[in-house]
Amino acid sequence: MFRGFYTVGSGMIAQQRRTEMLANNIANANTPGFKAEQSSIRSFPEMFMSSVHAQRIPTQKGIQLNGLKPVGELSTGVYMQETMPLFTQGSLRETGMTTDIALLDGNLPINPETGEQGAVFFRLENENGNELYTKNGNFTIDAAGFLTNPMGYYILDTNGRRIQLQNDDFSITDAGDIMQDGATVATLGVSFAEQPGALLKQGNGLFASNGNLPEAQTIAGVGYSFQQGYLESSNVDAAKSMTDMLAAYRAFEANQKILQAYDRSMEKAVNEIGRVNG
């Protein structure tokens, strides 16, 4: 009985966390470059149950031996093991702003060991000088003329240097070359993650790595391009996320009803079965 409380309790916690993840996906459905999260729900190891029974051996003294009779396996509940971003390309949305840049996936190698496809990201530098990565190309130019993201982090070029422009009157080629007054000012830096699932999520569409990711131009077989005046939308499927959220809510509600049934059984056991009549 008490194992049942733990089993349904773990199920309710897992579905609650899944609901929170789906709610976050829906809330960021219109956030440029946002990558939807997926959950992995696993079962705890099962227990093999046996019952103790006595067996009397027909001897002169009537020896009695205790043994175990197999009952079967018992699930001990579930848990949400992890959440992982889905790095598929989102659709493009035209803005007409010269500082809005979409990074388009091209030929991206697949890791032969894991079967995971690599991903490309803009290179950023935060206030501590550390590199971060994003697919959100909603950039702007700060007071000093540096190209920055909405949080004020600097956009880096292929050499890892900050990109400084005279104004927002510039153009970008498909290869990422920034042209201003007929000259190439810089080339947008792009990093390649062979295993994007191993990146550390930082919030606000940013990712970090244990070590700096390599420049994509130095990796053979990595293809990508840029589209100025466009933003990559999130890859959240709002309709599917709503359906999944309803399914998670129903699963939570089913576990809740089982918990209430256990509670009523325990109440009856204490108040009726365990009552001692004088």
Image (tube, rainbow, N blue to C red):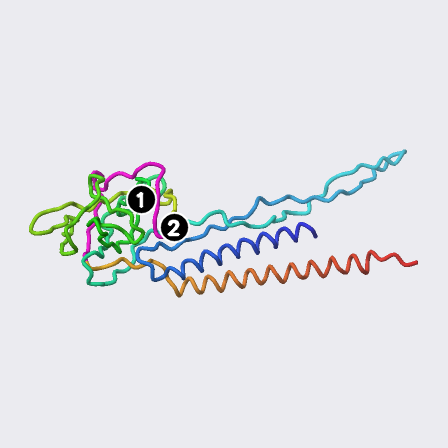
- Which region is colored magenta? 203-228
Rendered view: 215 above or below 14: above
Q: Which mark is residue 203?
A: 2
Name the foreground residue: 247 vs 21. 21
Q: Which mark is residue 37?
A: none
Q: Which of marks 2 and 1 is in front?
A: 1
Indicate left or right for 206 with 272 as reference. Answer: left
Query: Which residue is located at x 80 percent, y 60 percent?
Result: 271
Indicate left or right for 261 with 273 as reference. Answer: left
Q: Where is residue 5 in the image (x, y as percent from the top left)?
A: 65, 53
Q: In which quarter of the image is residue 190?
A: top left
Indicate left or right for 40 with 70 as reference. Answer: left
User: Tag 1: Cα neighbours inside 10 Å, few (<14), some, or many (≥20)?
Assistant: some
Q: Quadrant of residue 116?
A: top left
Q: Label 1's element?
A: loop
Name the foreground residue: 21 vs 96. 96
User: Tag 2: Cα neighbours inside 10 Å, few (<14), some, or many (≥20)?
Assistant: few
Q: What residue type is labelled 1?
A: Asn
Query: Which residue is located at x 30 percent, y 59 percent?
Result: 233
Mark found first going from the N terminus, 2 or 1: 1
Q: Position of residue 123 (x, y in %)?
A: 26, 45
Q: Where is residue 154 in the image (x, y as percent from the top left)?
A: 26, 46
So how many labels did they put on this image? 2
The alpha-carbon separation of the residues under discs 2 and 1 comes to: 13 Å
Name the foreground residue: 150 vs 225. 150
Q: In which quarter of the image is residue 193?
A: top left
Judged from this view, the residue extending furthest toward the right is 278
Whether residue 227 appears in magenta in the rendering, the answer is: yes
Q: Mark 1 points at which residue?
A: 126
